[in-house]
Amino acid sequence: MSAPGEFRFVSRDRRVREDRRFVAGRGRYVADIERPGMLHVALVHSPHPAARILSIESQAALALPGVRLVLTGEQLAAAVEPLMNGLDTPHVQRYPMAVGQARYAGEWVAAVVADTRAIAEDAAELVEVAYEPLPFVIDAEEAYTPQSTPVHEKHGSNVLLDRTFVWGEVEEHFAQSDHKLALRVTWGRNSTVPIETFGVVASWDPWSDTLDVWASIQMPKYADQIARALRLPGNGVRVHYDVDVGGSYGVKRGIKHTVLVGHLSRLLNRPVRLIEDRLENMRSGDAHGPDRIFDVEVAFNSDGVVNSMKMRALDNAGAYAGRAPFQLGKPIGAIVGPYRIKSVRYQAVSVTSNKAAQEAVRGFGQAPTNYAIESMMDRVAAHVGIDRLEVRRRNFIGADEFPYLIPSGTRYDSGDYHTVMDKVLAHVEWPALLAERDRLRATGMLAGIGVAACLEPSGGNSSFEPLLNEKNNTTTWMESVRINVDALGTVSVMIHTTSSGQGHETLASTVVGEALGLDPDKIRVVRPDSLASLPGNSPVGSRMAIMMGGAAHLAAGKLIDKCKAIAAHQFGCADEAVDYASGSVIERATGRTLAWADLVGVAHRNHHLLPDGMQPGLEATHIYQVPNASELPVDGRIQMYPCHSFEFHMTLVAIDPILGKVEFRRYVIGHDCGVVINPHIVKGMTLGGIAHGIGAALMEEFVYGEDGQMMSQTFMDYLLPSSHEMPHVEIVHHCTPSPLTVLGQKGSGESGYLGAPAAVSGAINDAVAPLGLRFEKLPIRLTKISDAVAAASPKQDRTL
Amino acid sequence: MKAAAFSYVRPSTLAEACAILRADEDARLIAGGQTLAPMMAMRLARPSQLVDIARLPELAGVADAGDALVFGAAVRQAEAERSPLVAARLPLLAKALPWVGHQPTRSRGTIGGSVANADPAAEIPLVLATLGGAVDFMTCDGPGHIAAQDFFAGPMMTALPADAVLTAVRFPVWSTPVGVGFHEISARRSDFAYVSAAAQASFDEDGVCIACTLGLGGAAAVPTRLESVALKLAGRRMTDAEIAEALEEAVAALEIMTDSYASPEYRRRVAKELGARALRDARDSAPGSRP
């Protein structure tokens, strides 16, 4: 963290302003929105993984008192535009509900609107759909074969994306290296599974031609996409950003839900609400994360120095393209991790299957990639017989090498990986930790230490879009903040997005308070609706500390400039002759001061005292472009995210060899996200991310059976780690400021999750290595560990 | 996740509750609702009416009958967990109760409800089976009584007549001082156990086992008392080796449940291990044991 004294409010131990209302249960979520005459939606789901829809009979449902409408996927498709498709795959069309054919078990086939959700559910059971089951494919490798049944017949195959990048002299480096090895690791399909499912209320007002939308969203360009799909002008949709969002980490996109209820509201001239239930969220919400097989080849020297890597990532996108293919693209910006790997061949393959579609999930594909890279580093270390830490140390990019250009075209801004690792080793007293592992082993437990070193690219642009789709030439990913000082001298900061736990109100008020030298607690943060908002891209890609923080800081700078100009005019001196501090402007030479109240008074009431040509009022706006990213790709290379946070995980686990249960004895993370704006928010992100990563490593998975049905449909089967499973986490701080950002800050919204799965997997593999075992597929369930240990152990009964 | 339509009644007497059940075969009893309510929300259960028996005076309270503690069926699990009587007289149940669901679910869930639900992985039925307890019930025809070994018929199935109200659960209390052991394994704390094991043992002054009992949950279709283990270990000192030997055969003879959570091999291996741990704990915590 930053040196004490450098900031008054930033990095300080200050309360998170949002916490009060959340802890007291006074948040205002979409389900708290009540509109007069509001109707409710329930869905009819396909029971088949693939089936032609022969007919939909809704008479019985409509006969039920309180039922207003049954809408089929076909009827909806006739009235709206297809949902946005990021790739250039025109024959992989997607509408909110199945049209003619259902492509996964649980897909929406029809919607029922009724006076209450309970009546809508009763009626949904009465909708009779005749299906003709079709062949289906669940497995990604099978889907990748030319003979597999295409999920979208017109597309001709299941391949959405199959692109090979070669960055550097890969073959040459392979030929020159002492050793090569190959490995395969598999990342199970998990997600973020928020406490609050997705919800939306849409209300059409024919007298103002406006669709008002309240939604549980974390979605860039949400209003634009809704307007486009509903064939409304952009200013015909008003999204209310002042609803709290009960968790997201990527998945709260809800385009199909919103297009559906938006259309229904227009059709029925009534407010319409759809709140997913848990089953809908898990099975039909299109909110699963990456589902990925990595085949990695690595070329390295006898001293453990890695020269080159070939990686094929095969991702099972599910039934529609969605964001899944792009989640193979984002990791290109950190494809070598924190290591000095000279060249890379990367093959990104995304295939459709008859699973639910994916959505963006925390890290946007980076956590699986980090798991593959870190598994590779452990294997390299074992192969050359050098300690895992030493191998990492030898491959780390040095603190003096930044900015560091990686082969795929991204420049890492800053970092000090060696120091962070050394701080963690000092904190755990490495020899003592090793001794503790060996002591545990001597008691008959399996015990292992896992490490993971990885990056959190932050400041989210979406450079992967032009990289993977030549028709996309987007290079702008802005965020905007407006500051207004009213005639009474109080400050309001306008932010233009919803928040799903990121603490944007604390962020914006802290940064503006710091810049203006005013108490952040007295600064109000306001969220105008989308029609009153400046452009932005919402909180994705760990961007808001950088982007909203940057916009807020720069807007405050403009406000300060105006204050200085007002005072300099009053003093009859040059603008350069005055300083701004804590709300006052002081003439350097004379010490003459114009206090805040006077500055506000001149701006609002004394036009005769304003400099010539200056507009009245005290207001400033900044629309901030992502630093260091304005170019289109060249030769498959591009600058992905601008900033790079670093995390170094170390964990000691003990495993009962018969029960297979993994117990955490120690969990330490060294974390460097540059200058921290609010330490409590960063700590919360990191602890939550580690919990999420432990879930991915040990228990969370959306499992599909051979019959194409999703088996983990409830929290009895999709297992989230609870507070019982969460170890005490020790955080070791380090601060390498980013040279690209206003305060030196980097992102931390994905911290913890990016390395925890690799660290936990590494610890388990260290524990079972003496038995000759290795787990290469996540999640590693306890029963799997026990069964493997039993099969590997010499036949003996420990109870004897 | 909205329940299908149903009606709700709260009879003021046990007789009234019995009459409703007799008249409507789709009526279901509700007390704590910790299993039934989510089942209804998922529409996996669709009762025509809910008969709320939580406040019936006939189903309240814990009575000490000398050789047993008798729990009114509507006694909340949390109440039993806090009861000094249970801690003193039924240490095995006291040890198992913290494993039942979570604290908030125990505040609502009842002893009788858990027994009537007959989940093969549930802790209270396991303790009942391990101690060889019994249940009392009432129908319009009068009271009835079923021993635990005859009560549990399969996963979520019991010998209780369809129109009966389970009124009381009887847990035997041994006349000699006991030691107890309880272990279970699940993916997360308080999830349904893959396997659980409950044991109780009593020793004479010479350190010889007078009586012992071991039950396994989660492993088979019903909570199962391993009679052969009790027979083998009675009259012995219950050394680790004797425990292991007794378990070897008994677990091999068990009909192990199969599902997607754990392989049958896992359940058998872990049943043996947790059974041994529970027995060793029972032995080591019993007054007078000298293995």
Image (cartoon, helix red, strand yellow):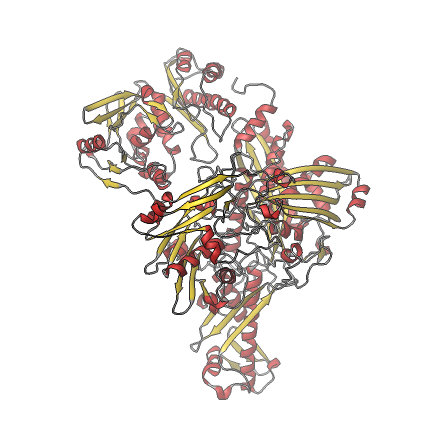
Question: Residue B279: in sight, yes or no?
Answer: yes
In this rendering, position of residue B205 left or right of residue A667:
left
Question: Which residue occupies 46% across, 81% down?
Answer: A604
Of the pair A490 and A406, the residue shown nearer to us:
A406
Q: Quadrant of residue A605?
A: bottom left
Residue at the top extreme of this rendering: B235
In this rendering, position of residue A228 left or right of residue A467:
left
Pinpoint residue B120: horizontal percent, then vertical percent.
39, 27
Pinpoint residue A679: horizontal percent, then vertical percent.
52, 56
Pinpoint residue A772: horizontal percent, then vertical percent.
65, 28
With respect to residue A676, does A425 lie above or below?
Answer: above
Question: Which residue occupies 79% across, 48% down?
Answer: A169
With respect to residue A229, does A787 lie above or below?
Answer: above
Q: Quadrant of the N terminus of chain A?
A: bottom right
With respect to residue A640, does A648 lie above or below?
Answer: above
In this rendering, position of residue A477 left or right of residue A101:
right
With respect to residue B117, does A375 lie above or below?
Answer: below
Of the pair A84 and B251, the residue shown nearer to us:
A84
Residue at the bottom extreme of this rendering: A608
Q: Quadrant of residue A147?
A: top right
Pinpoint residue A780: horizontal percent, then vertical percent.
56, 35
Label count reads: 0
Question: Which residue occupies 46% across, 67% down?
Answer: A236
